[in-house]
Amino acid sequence: MSALAPPNPKTPIDYPDSDGLPMSDNTVQFTWIAILMWSAEAYFRNRPDVFVAGDHLIYPVEGQPDIRQAPDVYVAFGRPKGDRGSYKVWEEGGLFPQVVFEVWSPNNRYTQMQKKFEFYERYGVEEYYIVYPEFPAHAEGWQREGGKLVSVPEMNGFTSPRLGFRFVLGGGQLAVFGPDGRQLRSPSEIAAERDAAERTLAAEREQVAKLLARIRELGGDPNGV
């Protein structure tokens, strides 16, 4: 009687952390990707159950690594913060990210964007937005209704139900405002605003110091001012 052959070990499936494609095609596209991602991270920084990522692969089906997309930005509610090589839906409580942004570049093609749309619609995104940063800048949006993504009829003034981001379009320009009413800005713009506020505060302190010094010169009591 021949000995039984040992079972063949199951070959592990590789889910690459990179699709080999560039994150962006130009600086305008990258700036918008960065602003959307950093702003989402900032607004939800105190929510441990909100995960934000950019240019990060999503694998919706276990055992099928060829089914994947890397959105420019996505937000997953109900998932903990923390580093991940990729977002595997079956390891994330079965939750597909609820909000996805794609930022249009001149190298995008209709067929490519259509495939992305079909992917997000099939696997469960709730809100899908395409931002067109080049003049005339604008945006398109879709919301899930009855298992389908339905176009938002008017994006000017529309507010994302999940994020609270409000889109404002006009004069060939696009602006996005956060839940607090502030316009989403780049880190350099935020730093410039902070520096201006610090200069103003320093100037006010200097004026107060001069006033108190003058009062002392005149023999007054600065604490009684």
Image (cartoon, helix red, strand yellow):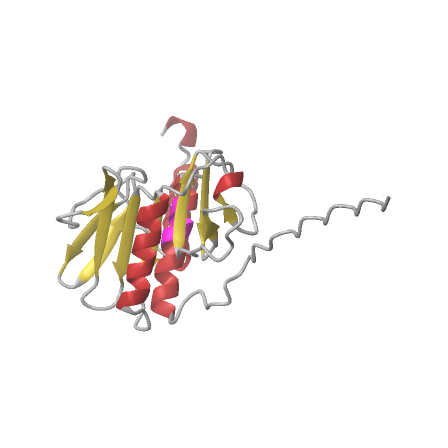
74 to the left or right of 5: left
Query: Where the N terminus falls, by quadrant?
Result: top right
Displayed quadrant of residue 124 = top left
**43 in relation to 111, above or below:** above
Asked whether residue 80 is in view, the answer is: yes
Q: Nearer the viewer, residue 95 or 37?
A: 95
* In magenta segment, residue 27: no
162 to the left or right of 78: left
Residue 178 x %, y %: 30, 43
Displayed quadrant of residue 224 = top left
**80 in relation to 101, above or below:** above
Q: Main secondary structure of the magenta part?
A: helix
Residue at the spot x=40%, y=32% of the render? 220
Residue 161 x %, y %: 26, 37
Residue at the spot x=22%, y=56% of the render? 139
Residue 165 x %, y %: 28, 44
Residue at the spot x=37%, y=62% of the render? 31
Specify start and end residues of the magenta stretch as a single range: 36-40
97 to the left or right of 84: left
